[in-house]
Image: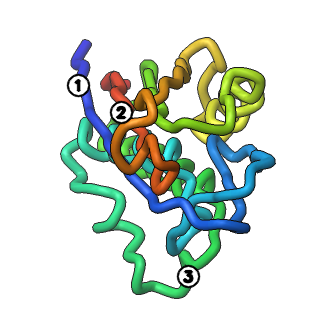
Amino acid sequence: MKIKVGFGFDVHQLKDQHPFILGGVKLEHHKGAFGHSDADVLVHAICDALLGAANLRDIGHHFKNTDERWRGISSLILLTECVRLIGEKGFIVGNVDAMLCLEAPKINPHVPAMKKNIAQAMGCDEDDISIKATTNETMGFIGREEGVVAYAVCLIEKK
């Protein structure tokens, strides 16, 4: 069996009175991530991990922020497309381990819903998705709530 590992990273600016979507879940918060799509930093990091593992470049290559087709789109749709792309190369998702870094809001209550959304978009079991969160201990742009960061690693397996 051939396996490959991928790493993904994404960062988005936080803006007042903007929707905050993580893992396909809309969070109640006074700030939200800003971007061309729904700015779901968690899903974007997972997309990049999958694409990287399959040597398919990055999310910006496939879903350009200058293409109006992707404006405001749910990142879960982009994730489903990434899984289709790795499938064309003969791979399936083994697992994903993701980390969010933000000061607020608290993520833990939303992790089950995020895992459900992501697993559904990827066509895998929720048990194959790990989502964790940490703060930046009030330091830097994350600590000042100016941005949010996500990291993800994945394992893909040849069918």
Dot 2 alpha-carbon crowd within 10 angstroms: few under 14, some 14 to 19, many 20 or more = many
Dot 3 alpha-carbon crowd within 10 angstroms: few under 14, some 14 to 19, many 20 or more = few
Residue 10 appears at what percent x and percent y?
Answer: 37, 49
The mark that comes first in sequence, 2 or 3, is 3
Please name the residue shown 36% across and 26% down the image.
154
Mark count: 3
| Amino acid tagged 1 | Lys
| Amino acid tagged 3 | Arg
Instruction: Work out which quarter of the rendered image holds the N terminus and state it.
Output: top left
| Amino acid tagged 2 | Phe
Q: Secondary structure at mark 2?
A: strand
For marks 1 and 3, give the CA distance: 30 Å
Residue 28 appears at what percent x and percent y?
Answer: 80, 48
Kindly identify which residue carries mark 1: 4
Instruction: Work out which quarter of the rendered image holds the C terminus and state it.
Output: top left
Dot 1 alpha-carbon crowd within 10 angstroms: few under 14, some 14 to 19, many 20 or more = some
